[in-house]
Amino acid sequence: MRSLFEDPQDDLKKLPFEEVQARAERCTRCRLKDSRTRVVFGEGPVPCDLMFIGEAPGEVEDQTGRPFVGPAGQKLTEILASVGIQREDVYITNTVKCRPPGNRLPQKDEMDACWPYLEAQIHHIKPKIIVTLGNAPTQLLLRTSEGITKLRGQFFPWRDGIEVFPMFHPSYLLRNPSKAPGSPKYLTWQDIRKLKARLDELRASAPKPSEP
Ligand code: URA
C-alpha cells in the first residue's frame, strides 16, 4: 500500500516543510533525475522575508547539494553584502532542484515538474519579496516572455501580497565585468539598493508581534 505521503497528487503545500524537502530529495518527476549527483533543494531560514530564486544548480551545487555556492554564488554573496544583507539571512533556491546536463537552461517541462516544490517552499517561507535572478525564474513567476533587461529593477505584485523583484543573474555579471554607467553591474548596484530600501520599508510597516 502507498504511504500517505507518497501520492504524487498530494498538494505539497499541505505537507510539513521537512517532508517537502524529503520528497524533493527522492524526486523522479523529470529527466534531470538521471544526470544529477545531489538534489539542491535550497537553504535559509523558514519563514524568511527575502527569498532568491535562481535558474538551476550548476556543477558545484550538484556536487555539494547547496544552492549558489560556485562562482555565481560568490558574486551573489558579494552583492548582498554591499547593502549589509548576510547570505545566511535569506532563503535561496532555484526553479529546478537538479542540475541540467552541461549547465544548459532548465526546460519548460522540467520547471513545470518542479513547480509544486517551489510553490510549497514559497508557501512555508512566506517572503515579503521574491528576487528572481535572470530570465528563467522571472518568466516562470510572472508568466511572461518579456526579457530580464526590460523587467529588472521593478516590483511586481504577485500572490498573497508578495512582491517579485527581477534582477540580472550573477553569472551574467561575471561575464560582463564593466562597471560603466548603464552596464549590467552598474544597474545591479542600483537594484540591490532599491531592494534593500523596499525591504526596510515593508519591515517597518509590518505589525509588531504584540499588535492586533
Ligand atoms: N546558478 C543558479 O542559477 N543557481 C545556482 O544554484 C547556481 C548557479
Image (spheres, grey):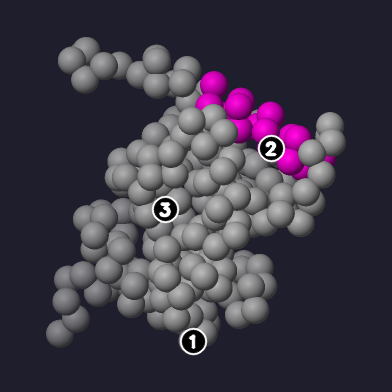
Q: CA distance from mark 3 to mark 2?
A: 26 Å
Image location of residue 25, percent across then percent down: 34, 72
Left or right of residue 94: residue 167: right
Look at label 2 and name its amino acid: Thr
Q: CA distance from mark 1 to mark 2?
A: 35 Å
Left or right of residue 153: residue 175: right
Q: How many numbered discs sit on the rendered protein?
A: 3
Look at label 3 and name its amino acid: Glu
User: Badge 2: few (under 14), some or many (20 or more) residues near its Cα, within 10 Å?
Assistant: many
Magenta range is 183-197
Q: Label for residue 76?
A: none
Q: Is disc 1's CB within 8 Å of ligand 1?
A: no
Residue receiving disc 2: 188
Residue receiving disc 3: 119
Residue receiving disc 1: 34
Look at label 1 and name its amino acid: Asp
Q: Secondary structure at mark 3?
A: helix
User: Badge 1: few (under 14), some or many (20 or more) residues near its Cα, within 10 Å?
Assistant: few
- Queried whether the magenta region covers residue 188, the answer comes back as yes
Q: Is residue 187 visible?
A: yes
Q: CA distance from mark 3 to mark 1?
A: 23 Å
Does label 1 or label 2 sit earlier along the sequence? Answer: 1
Image point (66%, 68%), residue name: 105
Image point (44%, 44%), residue name: 87
Which-is-in-front pick, marks 3 and 2?
2
